[in-house]
Amino acid sequence: MIKTNQGMIPKDAQSLPQSVKKMWLLINLLGLAVILIVAVVINIFLKFDWQNPILLGLNGVVGILLIIAIVDIVLIPYNYHFYKYILNEDAISVYKGFFLRKSETIPLNRIQNVDTRQGPILRLFHLHNIVIVTAANAFKIEGISEDVAQYLRTQLISAARQAREVETDE
Protein backbone atom coordinates (compact mmCIF):
# COMPACT_ATOMS: atom_id res chain seq x y z
CA MET A 1 0.00 0.00 0.00
CA ILE A 2 1.00 3.54 -0.65
CA LYS A 3 0.90 6.00 2.20
CA THR A 4 -1.10 9.06 1.17
CA ASN A 5 -2.55 12.06 2.90
CA GLN A 6 -5.55 9.82 3.60
CA GLY A 7 -3.58 7.33 5.69
CA MET A 8 -2.96 3.88 4.29
CA ILE A 9 -5.58 4.04 1.54
CA PRO A 10 -4.06 3.18 -1.85
CA LYS A 11 -4.03 6.02 -4.37
CA ASP A 12 -5.94 3.95 -6.92
CA ALA A 13 -8.79 3.07 -4.53
CA GLN A 14 -12.23 3.87 -5.93
CA SER A 15 -14.52 6.48 -4.39
CA LEU A 16 -18.28 6.18 -4.21
CA PRO A 17 -20.39 8.32 -6.57
CA GLN A 18 -21.27 11.85 -5.38
CA SER A 19 -24.97 10.93 -5.23
CA VAL A 20 -24.29 8.70 -2.22
CA LYS A 21 -23.96 11.86 -0.10
CA LYS A 22 -27.51 12.86 -1.04
CA MET A 23 -28.72 9.34 -0.24
CA TRP A 24 -27.05 9.40 3.20
CA LEU A 25 -28.56 12.84 3.84
CA LEU A 26 -32.06 11.63 2.91
CA ILE A 27 -31.72 8.56 5.14
CA ASN A 28 -30.57 10.71 8.06
CA LEU A 29 -33.34 13.26 7.50
CA LEU A 30 -35.95 10.48 7.44
CA GLY A 31 -34.52 9.13 10.69
CA LEU A 32 -34.61 12.61 12.17
CA ALA A 33 -38.26 13.00 11.11
CA VAL A 34 -39.18 9.66 12.70
CA ILE A 35 -37.49 10.66 15.97
CA LEU A 36 -39.33 13.99 16.01
CA ILE A 37 -42.70 12.39 15.21
CA VAL A 38 -42.25 9.79 17.97
CA ALA A 39 -41.27 12.55 20.41
CA VAL A 40 -44.34 14.64 19.57
CA VAL A 41 -46.67 11.61 19.85
CA ILE A 42 -45.21 10.65 23.23
CA ASN A 43 -45.53 14.23 24.48
CA ILE A 44 -49.15 14.42 23.28
CA PHE A 45 -49.94 11.05 24.86
CA LEU A 46 -48.44 12.16 28.19
CA LYS A 47 -50.19 15.56 27.84
CA PHE A 48 -46.97 17.60 27.87
CA ASP A 49 -46.70 16.99 31.64
CA TRP A 50 -43.18 18.35 32.24
CA GLN A 51 -43.34 17.17 35.86
CA ASN A 52 -43.62 13.53 34.72
CA PRO A 53 -40.20 11.84 35.14
CA ILE A 54 -41.01 9.34 32.37
CA LEU A 55 -41.62 12.19 29.93
CA LEU A 56 -38.44 13.96 31.01
CA GLY A 57 -36.43 10.75 30.54
CA LEU A 58 -37.96 10.03 27.14
CA ASN A 59 -37.35 13.61 26.00
CA GLY A 60 -33.75 13.28 27.19
CA VAL A 61 -33.31 10.12 25.11
CA VAL A 62 -34.94 11.83 22.12
CA GLY A 63 -32.58 14.78 22.57
CA ILE A 64 -29.56 12.48 22.54
CA LEU A 65 -30.86 10.70 19.41
CA LEU A 66 -31.38 14.06 17.71
CA ILE A 67 -27.81 15.12 18.52
CA ILE A 68 -26.47 11.83 17.13
CA ALA A 69 -28.53 12.24 13.95
CA ILE A 70 -27.35 15.84 13.46
CA VAL A 71 -23.70 14.86 14.03
CA ASP A 72 -24.14 12.04 11.49
CA ILE A 73 -25.49 14.56 8.96
CA VAL A 74 -22.59 16.95 9.59
CA LEU A 75 -20.09 14.08 9.09
CA ILE A 76 -21.44 13.02 5.67
CA PRO A 77 -18.62 14.79 3.71
CA TYR A 78 -16.03 13.23 6.04
CA ASN A 79 -17.53 9.75 5.63
CA TYR A 80 -17.67 10.18 1.86
CA HIS A 81 -14.06 11.33 1.59
CA PHE A 82 -12.68 8.30 3.41
CA TYR A 83 -15.03 5.55 2.13
CA LYS A 84 -13.15 3.79 -0.68
CA TYR A 85 -12.67 0.32 -2.11
CA ILE A 86 -10.17 -1.42 -4.35
CA LEU A 87 -10.20 -4.74 -6.17
CA ASN A 88 -6.85 -6.34 -6.90
CA GLU A 89 -5.83 -9.78 -8.15
CA ASP A 90 -6.25 -11.65 -4.84
CA ALA A 91 -8.54 -9.55 -2.62
CA ILE A 92 -11.01 -6.71 -2.37
CA SER A 93 -10.42 -4.10 0.30
CA VAL A 94 -12.88 -1.60 1.76
CA TYR A 95 -11.64 1.46 3.67
CA LYS A 96 -13.78 3.62 5.95
CA GLY A 97 -12.96 6.56 8.21
CA PHE A 98 -9.81 8.38 9.21
CA PHE A 99 -10.02 9.00 12.95
CA LEU A 100 -11.96 5.79 13.50
CA ARG A 101 -10.36 3.75 10.74
CA LYS A 102 -11.79 0.52 9.52
CA SER A 103 -10.38 -1.51 6.69
CA GLU A 104 -11.71 -4.85 5.57
CA THR A 105 -9.87 -7.11 3.15
CA ILE A 106 -11.66 -10.09 1.71
CA PRO A 107 -9.54 -12.72 -0.06
CA LEU A 108 -11.17 -13.60 -3.37
CA ASN A 109 -10.78 -17.34 -2.77
CA ARG A 110 -12.96 -17.02 0.38
CA ILE A 111 -15.91 -15.36 -1.37
CA GLN A 112 -18.96 -17.60 -1.47
CA ASN A 113 -21.58 -15.21 -2.76
CA VAL A 114 -21.88 -11.68 -4.16
CA ASP A 115 -25.26 -9.94 -4.05
CA THR A 116 -26.46 -6.54 -5.15
CA ARG A 117 -29.26 -4.99 -3.12
CA GLN A 118 -31.37 -1.96 -3.86
CA GLY A 119 -34.13 -0.59 -1.66
CA PRO A 120 -36.46 2.30 -2.52
CA ILE A 121 -34.03 5.03 -1.40
CA LEU A 122 -31.12 3.47 -3.30
CA ARG A 123 -33.38 3.10 -6.34
CA LEU A 124 -34.26 6.80 -6.14
CA PHE A 125 -30.55 7.67 -6.53
CA HIS A 126 -29.78 4.80 -8.98
CA LEU A 127 -27.41 3.15 -6.48
CA HIS A 128 -26.81 -0.39 -5.23
CA ASN A 129 -25.24 -2.01 -2.21
CA ILE A 130 -22.89 -4.90 -2.88
CA VAL A 131 -22.85 -7.63 -0.24
CA ILE A 132 -19.88 -10.00 -0.30
CA VAL A 133 -20.47 -13.18 1.70
CA THR A 134 -17.74 -15.46 3.03
CA ALA A 135 -18.08 -18.47 5.32
CA ALA A 136 -17.31 -16.31 8.36
CA ASN A 137 -18.85 -12.93 7.56
CA ALA A 138 -20.71 -10.64 5.18
CA PHE A 139 -19.18 -7.39 3.95
CA LYS A 140 -21.02 -4.48 2.37
CA ILE A 141 -19.97 -1.73 0.01
CA GLU A 142 -22.67 0.94 0.15
CA GLY A 143 -23.99 3.17 -2.58
CA ILE A 144 -22.28 2.11 -5.79
CA SER A 145 -23.74 3.26 -9.10
CA GLU A 146 -25.80 0.64 -10.95
CA ASP A 147 -23.39 0.02 -13.81
CA VAL A 148 -20.34 -0.16 -11.51
CA ALA A 149 -22.21 -2.48 -9.13
CA GLN A 150 -23.01 -4.95 -11.90
CA TYR A 151 -19.47 -4.74 -13.26
CA LEU A 152 -17.93 -5.20 -9.80
CA ARG A 153 -20.25 -8.12 -9.03
CA THR A 154 -19.27 -9.85 -12.27
CA GLN A 155 -15.57 -9.17 -11.64
CA LEU A 156 -15.76 -10.48 -8.04
CA ILE A 157 -17.54 -13.67 -9.08
CA SER A 158 -15.09 -14.27 -11.91
CA ALA A 159 -12.04 -13.51 -9.76
CA ALA A 160 -13.32 -15.70 -6.91
CA ARG A 161 -13.87 -18.56 -9.34
CA GLN A 162 -10.35 -18.16 -10.77
CA ALA A 163 -8.80 -17.92 -7.29
CA ARG A 164 -10.47 -21.19 -6.30
CA GLU A 165 -9.28 -22.90 -9.50
CA VAL A 166 -5.68 -21.77 -8.88
CA GLU A 167 -5.93 -22.93 -5.26
CA THR A 168 -7.13 -26.42 -6.25
CA ASP A 169 -4.50 -26.78 -8.99
CA GLU A 170 -1.61 -26.44 -6.53
Image (cartoon, grey):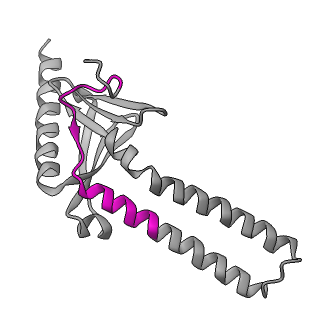
Q: Position of residue 117 (x, y in %)?
A: 27, 58
Give the residue at x 21% y 27%: 11
Image quarter in which the C terminus is found: top left
Q: Is residue 4 magenta?
A: no
Q: Is residue 161 above or below residue 22?
A: above
The N terminus lies in which quarter of the figure?
Answer: top left
Above or below, 4 relative to 15:
above
The residue located at (15%, 43%) in the rendering is 152
Q: Quadrant of residue 66?
A: bottom right
Q: Residue extending furthest top?
A: 170
Q: Is residue 23 magenta?
A: yes
Q: Nearer the viewer, residue 121 or 140?
A: 121
Q: Is residue 163 left or right of residue 23?
A: left
Q: Which residues are magenta?
A: 7-29
Q: Quadrant of residue 111?
A: top left
Residue 38 coordinates in the image, percent (x, y) = 62, 77
Q: Is residue 34 left or right of residue 153?
A: right
Q: Going 74% across and 64% down the picture, which residue do you hit?
A: 60
* Image coords of residue 155 (percent x, y): 11, 39
47 on left or right of 41: right
Seen from the viewer's position, the closer of residues 161 and 67 is 67
Which residue is drawn at the image coordinates 22% and 29% (left, top)? 108
Q: How many marks?
A: 0
**Residue 62 placement: quadrant:** bottom right
Residue 130: percent from left, percent from top: 26, 49
